[in-house]
């Protein structure tokens, strides 16, 4: 695949980026290196190699749900920067 300025401009538009001429040339060089690496990977003989689906042989290793010690409301509020009796106080986000 030939990397040209139009391809870089199209990718930049899709990514909502803007490049000056210097950055366009740098991106062009980087994209050419990436594509060359992918082409190099395509040269490797992978016949008889099963695709990797999971990183380990373990499948669905889940921990058992166990009841643990709970944090009391008093302990949870102990280090709160601002609190109002039983609740955390946070800045207003939405205004009516």
Image (cartoon, rainbow, N blue to C red):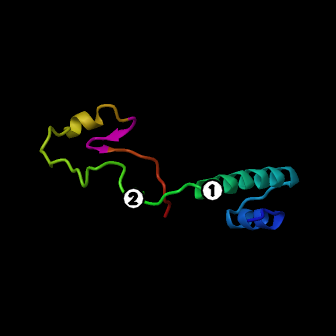
Place of residue 56 in the rendered image (x, y in percent of width and height, measured from the top left) = 32, 48
Vertical position of residue 88 compared to residue 31: above or below: above
Question: In the rendered image, which quarter is residue 82 located in?
Answer: top left
Q: Relative to 16, is 5 on the left or the right?
A: right
Mark 1 nearby-residue class (10 Å; few <14, some 14–19, many ≥20): few
Find out whether the residues at labels 2 and 1 contact each other: C-beta distance under 8 Å: no
State the separation of the CA atoms marked 2 and 1: 19 Å
Left or right of 96, for residue 3: right
Disc marking residue 2: none
Q: Which mark is residue 38?
A: 1
Image quarter in which the N terminus is found: bottom right
Q: Which mark is first along the chain, 1 or 2? A: 1
Residue 79 percent across, percent down from the top left: 33, 31
Question: Label 1's element?
Answer: helix
Residue farthest toward the left in the current orientation of the protein:
67
Query: In the image shown, does 51 or 31 lie closer to the viewer?
Result: 51
Q: Quadrant of residue 11?
A: bottom right
Name the residue rendered at 14%, 40% in the picture.
68
* Residue drawn where x is 49% and y is 59% of the image: 94
Q: Residue at x 50, y 60 (%)?
A: 95
The kind of secondary structure element at disc 2 is: loop
| Magenta span includes 63 | no
Q: Tell me where residue 36 appears, x and y as whole percent.
A: 69, 54
Q: Is residue 40 left or right of residue 66?
A: right
> Which segment is the magenta one?
81-87
- Front residue of 75 and 84: 75
The numbered dot on residue 50 is: 2
Instruction: Give the number of marks.
Output: 2
Mark whose residue sits in front, 2 or 1? 2
Dot 2: within a 10 Å radius of its alpha carbon, few (fewer than 14), some, or many (20 or more) residues? few
Q: Which quadrant of the structure image shows residue 18?
A: bottom right
Residue that appears at 12% across and 44% down: 67
């Amino acid at each position: 695949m030939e990397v040209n300025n139009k391809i870089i401009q199209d990718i930049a538009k899709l990514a909502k980026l803007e490049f000056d001429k210097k950055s366009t040339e740098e991106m062009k060089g980087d994209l050419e290196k990436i594509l060359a690496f992918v082409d190099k990977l395509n040269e490797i003989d992978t016949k008889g190699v099963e695709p990797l689906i999971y990183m380990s042989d373990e499948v669905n290793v889940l921990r058992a749900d166990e009841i643990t010690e709970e944090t009391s409301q008093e302990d949870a509020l102990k280090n709160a920067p601002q609190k109002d009796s039983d609740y955390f106080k946070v800045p207003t986000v939405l205004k009516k």
